[in-house]
Amino acid sequence: LYPPAWVISRRALIDGDVMGVEVPAGSYVFVSPYVLHRTKEYWPDPQTFNPERFAAGAGEQNARFTYIPFGAGPNLCIGRDLALMEAVLVVAAVASTCTLDPVIGHQVNLDPLVTIRPHGGLPMVLKKRF
């Protein structure tokens, strides 16, 4: 639900057309993964956290480029593989010794900086497993 970047921009190198809108060379085109990932046309119940929607084969009905947390194509985020590897390692390290539960009733507000961040952090209840 929260891609690293809330907006991605690209500069058109040649005159073109994007979804029926004329785009002259030199113009900037902006795409918001944050908005795209919440589009009901592509994602049933888009506001719900549902990891199963990304299980093998589950998203095949969606059009190409409907899920682009790190951008797409030749300008894909250079840090994508590192970020995914770090996420797996951190989650594995924490989950092997602790459980994390969200603070009940805490409302998450976002700071849309270069990357999306929870304003004031994301308070969690940490419990030791053993």
Image: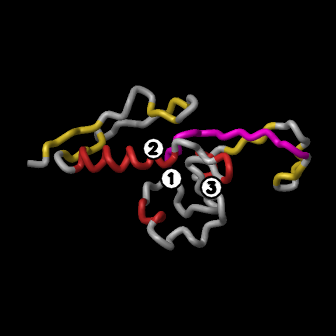
Q: Position of residue 128 (x, y in %)?
A: 13, 43
Q: Determine the main secondary structure of the stretch shown in magenta.
A: loop
| Numbered disc in front, either 2 or 1 | 2
Query: SS class of the residue under badge 1?
Result: loop
Q: Does the magenta segment cover residue 41?
A: no
Q: How many marks?
A: 3
CB under 8 Å between callouts 3 and 1? no
Q: Tell which circle, 3 or 1, labels the residue nearer the N-terminal end.
A: 3
CB under 8 Å between callouts 2 and 1? no
Where 57 falls versus 103 (above or below)? below
Q: Tell which circle, 2 or 3, labels the residue nearer the N-terminal end.
A: 3
| Residue placed under numbered mark 3 in the picture | 39
What kind of residue is marked 1?
A: Gln
| Residue placed under numbered mark 2 in the picture | 83
| Numbered disc in front, either 2 or 3 | 2
> Mark 1 packing: few (<14 Cα in 10 Å), some, or many (20+)?
few
Identify which residue is drawn at 31% across, 34% down: 123
Where 71 falls versus 65 (above or below)? above
Query: SS class of the residue under badge 3?
Result: loop
Residue 67 is labelled as none
Where 130 falls versus 108 (above or below)? below
Horizontal placement of 82 versus 94: left or right?
A: right
What kind of residue is marked 3?
A: Thr
Identify which residue is drawn at 62% across, 62% down: 42
| Residue placed under numbered mark 1 in the picture | 47
Q: Does the magenta segment cover residue 10?
A: yes
Please provide the residue range marked out in magenta: 1-14
Q: Nearer the viewer, residue 58 or 70?
A: 70
Q: Quadrant of residue 105?
A: top left
Whole-angstrom CA distance, mark 2 to mark 3, is 25 Å
Q: Tell which circle, 2 or 1, labels the residue nearer the N-terminal end.
A: 1
